[in-house]
Amino acid sequence: MPLFILDNLRSAFNVGSVFRTAEALYPAAVFLTGICCRPGNRKLSHTSRGTYATVPWRYFKQAEDAAIWAKKSGRMLVAVENSQDAVPLWEADYDLSSAFMFGNEADGLSPALAGMADISIYYPQSGIRKCINVSSIAAIIAAEIQRRKWLESNGMNT
């Protein structure tokens, strides 16, 4: 099952939206780290539409501990970043059960967490600012995972 690791997201609305995306991808899990709000937060509850009750989730004080847990469970760590070495998400070679790491809305992934990644992926954008919302990119990645699952289940190459 894919795992979304949220590195210190400030917005309860973004966290809630990622829960909804994870639920749509079922099965998928969410790891919250640092300053991320947790279920029980009113804004998260409203935005998530209660999906936090069915999506497995866990809180880690340090994002690196979440990544270590994911790695020990056999998952590939995928940094979602606009970095120099990043590969377009549809060309990248990652497992469907990978741990996708999303950075803070202002600062991106912490350098320590980015350094732990097995691969970095990005969504090519044609806009000037190139700053897609974190919950939007989570949904785009979920769509790509679903597409690959469909191809795989129909005996086609991804």
Image: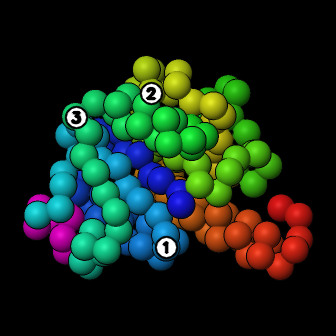
In the image, is residue 44 part of the stretch drawn in magenta?
yes
Mark 3 vs 2: CB contact within 8 A? no
Label whose residue precedes the other's in the sequence (1 or 2): 1
Q: x, y (%) of residue 19?
A: 35, 65
Residue name at image x 57 percent, y 30 percent: 117
Residue 124 visible in this rendered orientation of the protein: no
Residue 27 pos. (x, y %): 49, 70
Magenta segment? 41-47
Instruction: State which tag comes first along the sequence, 3 or 1.
Output: 1
Q: In the rendered image, which quarter contains the C terminus?
A: bottom right
Please give the name of the residue rendered at 89% of the width and 64% of the height, measured from the top-left corner: 157
Q: Secondary structure at mark 2?
A: helix
Farthest residue in the front direction?
73
Mark drawn on residue 26: 1
Kindly report the distance in space between the C-alpha atoms of the residues bearing marks 3 and 2. Answer: 13 Å
Q: Which kind of residue does numbered mark 1 sit on?
A: Tyr
Residue that label 3 marks: 61
Tell me the chief SS of the magenta region: helix
Residue type highlighted by circle 3: Lys
Q: Is residue 48 above or below residue 91?
A: below
Residue 157 on the magenta span = no
Q: Secondary structure at mark 1?
A: loop
In the rendered structure, the answer to whether residue 135 lies left or right of residue 14 reads right
- 40 with respect to 120 (left or right): left
Q: Where is residue 20 drawn, in percent x and y?
A: 38, 72
Q: CA distance from mark 1 to mark 2?
A: 25 Å
Q: Amino acid at mark 2?
A: Leu
Q: Which mark is residue 113?
A: 2
SS for tag 3?
loop
Q: CA distance from mark 3 to mark 1?
A: 25 Å
